[in-house]
Amino acid sequence: MKRTVYLLLLVAFLGYVQVLRAQEEDVVQVTDVQTTDVPDVVVIISHLCHFEKPLQDPTDLDDDQYCDCDVRNSDAGMPEILINCRKHHLVDGFWEGMEVLPQGTTRLDLSHNALTLVPRLSGGQLRYLNLGHNQITTIPDKVFGNVSQLEELDLSINRIEMLSTDALAGLPNLKRIDLSGNFITKIEVNAFSNALQLRHLILSNNSLGTFFNRTEADLYLRLGVTNRLEVLEMQRCNLTDINLSSGVGLERALLGHNRLEQLTKLPKQLSYLDISGTPIRSFPAKFLPHLLHLESLILQDMPILYTLEAYALYGLPRLSTLNLQGSRNLSSIHPHVFGQNVIRNETDTELKRLILKGTNIRTLNSTLQFAFENLRLLDIRGAPLRCDCQLRWLRDLSNLMTLGVCMKPNALRNQRFGTIESHQFQCRAEQFWIYTVFNVLLAILLIVLISIGIFLIVRAIKPKPHVQLRTIGATSPYARVTIEPNRAEVL
């Protein structure tokens, strides 16, 4: 019995020595120990990681040629390997042919290197692959066929010019792909049809305007995108129009900084829409029709947006966030922008956050009070607020936190809106009687003063009378003369 045990230990030791030799020679070695108690051991040598013990403890040295590898336990309790080759100056010649990843590798980061070709990898458990910030120009067909469990693929900031139909073949579990920051001008038909589980598609910062404007086809039907897509990012793609009518599963659309002037082909269940930086001058009535599930509308940095017209946001009963930050020319919001509150109660909104920071808004009409009943935050910092009686209603909303600084009148200049008492929001019309009485008294006093002044002037310039005293006697010509009645005719 003891001999058998010693024999087994000896065989295991010899097998371990063979494994170490195989690692040093960078070749694949298979121990061929045919016993009933010791199983076969297959060790795969990786160009990315170096292990002191086979597939267990990676050796990370700053001056070696290997990447940073880490072994940890997954949520299921199984060991998994995370490989980080970020900024390791890798080039295409680092490996030859197929690179077999260590068993259990779930994440591989090859970003910020000098790769011009997509490496051919093999790993049955790889979930995340980052090839961003390289010099990759093309994606060969079926190049990801041996990493079929991949769920996230990052190819951003490369030099890719076209996406072929079979570029993503073999990725049925792909949920997120980032192709932003490339030179893509053409996408072949059904290029995303192989990604059946795709949830998040990022195509921002590509010159796709000419491509989509020329085809005029529904993005889903043209590219083979399934209805499982939830998030679409196409910012700065030089688009003038976009057709997303078939996107019945789309929830978030980021279409900002394009040349869009109208949006009529959006899916009805959209809950988040970002069209910041688009050249829209004004929002006419029912600009976004039928978006009954829209919760967030982002309109930041709109360069020539001047006004939101009546009924512009009508028909958006679930809108809770409206962000107009940085739209510096916006100066007017119509009192009935959400609809008119009449017997039918058209103003039905759940608006909770309104961002007007950096706009040119000076006042808000009190008619908006019906739409602001559920509002909790109003950010109007940087706007030239005129804090008079026209905004008193806004200050009286008890559940509203308003962030902003008053610019007028001068008595309230540079005071924070929330610190001003309600009675301080005054207009001149409210103090008319005071001004009237004051003006009347001032007029009376002025008349009195003028009259006194005239009297004194006249008295000062009037000549004084010359008085002479003479003695009156019998011989004086000024003596009294008595005329008798009977002698009046003689005289």
Image (cartoon, helix red, strand yellow):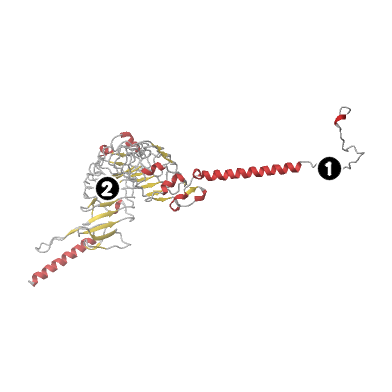
- How crowded is the residue under tag 2: few (<14 C-alpha within 10 Å), some, or many (20+)? many
The numbered dot on residue 467 is 1
Residue 341, percent from left and from top: 35, 39
The numbered dot on residue 176 is 2
Q: From the viewer's perspective, is residue 63 above or below residue 306?
A: below
- How crowded is the residue under tag 1: few (<14 C-alpha within 10 Å), some, or many (20+)? few
Residue located 13% across and 66% down the image: 11
Q: Is residue 427 left or right of residue 185?
A: right
Q: Does dot 2 land on a helix, a strand or a loop?
A: strand
Q: Quadrant of the N terminus?
A: bottom left
Q: Does dot 1 land on a helix, a strand or a loop?
A: loop
Q: Quadrant of residue 334?
A: top left
Q: Is residue 57 left or right of residue 207?
A: left
- In this view of the protein, which residue sits in the foreground, 458 or 384? 458
Q: Is residue 358 visible?
A: no
Residue 461, percent from left and from top: 76, 41
Total marks shown come to 2
Residue 302, percent from left and from top: 41, 42
Question: Quick one: label 1 or label 2, which is nearer the N terminus?
Answer: 2
Report the residue that reaches farthest toward the top. Answer: 489
The amino acid sitting under disc 2 is Arg
- In this view of the protein, which residue sits in the foreground, 146 or 379? 379
Q: Is residue 353 visible?
A: yes
Residue 16, percent from left and from top: 18, 65
